[in-house]
Image (cartoon, rainbow, N blue to C red):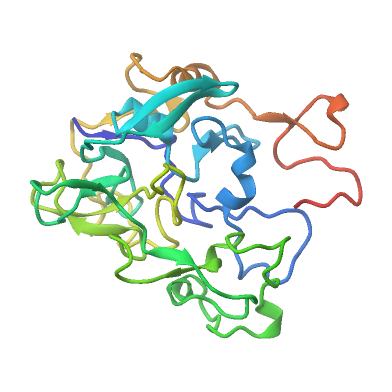
Amino acid sequence: MIKKTRTVLVVGLLGLSGAMNSIAQPPGMQMGDGVWLRDAYFGEVETFDSCLAHQPGQGMHHNHVQPICLRFTLGDNAEIVGTGRTGNVYREKAGPWTHSPILGWSLDGYPIYGPYGYSDPRSATSAVKRMQTGYRLRTMTGRTSLPDWALGYHPNVPRQLPTAQQGPAVNERFPLGRYVEDYEFVAGIGDLDQFNGRTTVTPDFPSGTYAYFVTIKADGSPAFPYIQGLQYNGTVRPQGGPGGMVTVPSDAVDYFNNGSFTGPQNMTDPQLKSLITGNGQTVARALIAWDPSSGPQTTWPGVQPAGARAP
């Protein structure tokens, strides 16, 4: 059975629907703001729970990177190795692997799979492997130019940037990886294209389809661009309209709809079950570091004393 989700895995893109690398803006303007887009995984990872997700002020629990609890629930090559203070601890299975299930649907109509696919995109009998990203960190000391793949996302911005659009120098405060433009796409070093997908046969589409894949490293940690790149491979159109989205199969199970759980109750992951049954739209709260005695505060927009600086 094909499974999909609309909330645990957010499938929009940066600046459009808050996907895997939303603009994690700390207070105050910095050099190159509006051109150099902060990577949410870099800037917000400390707020992630054991499902590698978190909640903004409106309480809509979401992932910027691989949804490990959803993957475990759907049998996507993950296993529990222990229980920590914040919930289960997961790791990738050593093998043998099975092809990942569909975790969600992109707004351009293509399926989003977990990290594992066929080694030969033309053959369903080929070995299953972890899909490797085609992105890597750039080698640079100054943020004076954009990578080629990002130019389409920055209309009317030249590759070689004028001084006002250059980002901060690479240093301890602004290390490589802070911004999504710190990465370059190199064709051939991975399995996927600049959109983080490829045309391939899958168990659900034996004749082939374009599909996105969640990307992780060998140790299971997220690998840029995590779910999708900054652009869609296809065209975003209303479902059912001219040239609209791929039709979702009639037997697909919709686990979430507008923040409400609509799927089966026999969830196997206790953290995910707790979230979907009671906490899916609860506003996240945290102790602020400069005055923990004041009690929990809402995570966003954040309250801070005058002069405090975000990292």
Picture coordinates of residue 265, whole percent (x, y): 35, 14
User: Is residue 250 found left or right of 179 in the rendered image?
Assistant: left
User: Is residue 155 found left or right of 244 in the rendered image?
Assistant: right
- Residue at image point 36% right, 62% down: 195
Quadrant of the image occupied by residue 273: top left
Pick the quarter of the image with the N terminus: top left
Quadrant of the image occupied by residue 55: top right
Picture coordinates of residue 175, whole percent (x, y): 65, 62
- Residue at image point 48% right, 70% down: 153
Q: Is residue 52 visible?
A: yes
Q: Is residue 30 above or below residue 223?
A: below
User: Is residue 94 found left or right of 178 in the rendered image?
Assistant: left
- Residue at image point 30% right, 34% down: 77
Seen from this angle, which residue lies furthest top?
266
- Residue at image point 56% right, 31% down: 49
Q: Is residue 168 above or below residue 96?
A: below
Seen from this angle, which residue lies furthest front?
94
Q: Is residue 166 above or below residue 70?
A: below
